Image: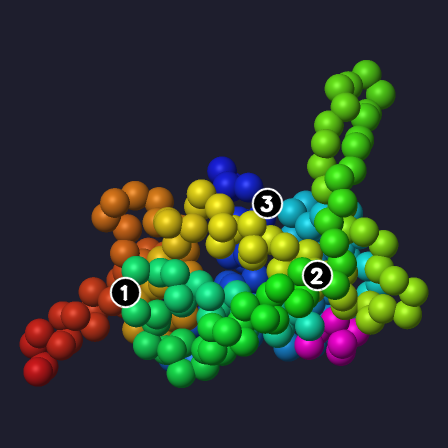
Amino acid sequence: MAAHDPSTRLALALAATLRHDGRGGVADDLTTPDALAAWVRDHAGDLPAGAAGPAADAEALAAAREVRAAVRALFARVVPGEPSRADAGRLMPVPAALDVLNTAAAATPVVPRLTWRPGGEPTAGHALAAAPAGAPPGRALAAALAHAAIAFLAGPDRPLLRACHAPRCVRYFLKGHPRQEWCTPSCGNRARVARHHTRHHP
């Protein structure tokens, strides 16, 4: 994933905060404000300036989780074939997902930002505009996540997006080579074991 742009990395990382837990269930990495704050720290390099804002609170967590639900619903729509069976029953309807994503993105616009390090060349980037006075603290983060998802879904990496169909997996990944079917080798092993069992125990 390192070769892709920050929007791609951020959108995929957000979707991946729901994952197979290794014991037959689904783990959620964004269950508390502290967990969200840790995730933001881990992905600070891909977030625009101003996205992290103050310490995460329950409102910021709810906003991030709502954007994540929208992202996963839209990912399920664009992948070839069906979404993961383990995920299909929890997906937000597509019109609602589009509304969530566009509303979150509009709450805090992105503005151009010029940086010029001593001895270097000027470079253009993006930052979130200052949130209006009294705006909820999670708005900037939710906006940044929505902007990343929109850029990814409308960008050149989207055709590589796949849903992992290993048993109980709910992850999405970018297909790195023509024969790649699963998000990780462990999912591939699980899928092969399941196929073998099905063939020999119909």
Q: Residues within 10 Å of mark 3 (few under 14, many from 20)?
A: some
- The quadrant the C terminus occupies is bottom left
Q: Residue at x 44, y 43 (%)?
A: 156
Q: Which residue is mark 2?
A: 106
Residue 197 image offset from top left, x and y in percent = 15, 75
Question: Is residue 186 shown above or below 58?
Answer: above
Residue 155 image offset from top left, x and y in percent = 49, 46
**Callout 1: SS:** loop
Q: Please provide the residue range marked out in magenta.
A: 57-62
The answer to whether residue 124 is magenta is no
Q: Which residue is mark 3?
A: 6
The three-letter amino acid code for the residue at tag 2 is Ala
The total of numbered circles placed on residues is 3
Compared across the picture, whether 199 is left or right of 94 comes to: left
Q: Residues within 10 Å of mark 1 (few under 14, many from 20)?
A: few
| Front of the two marks 2 and 1 | 2
The three-letter amino acid code for the residue at tag 3 is Pro
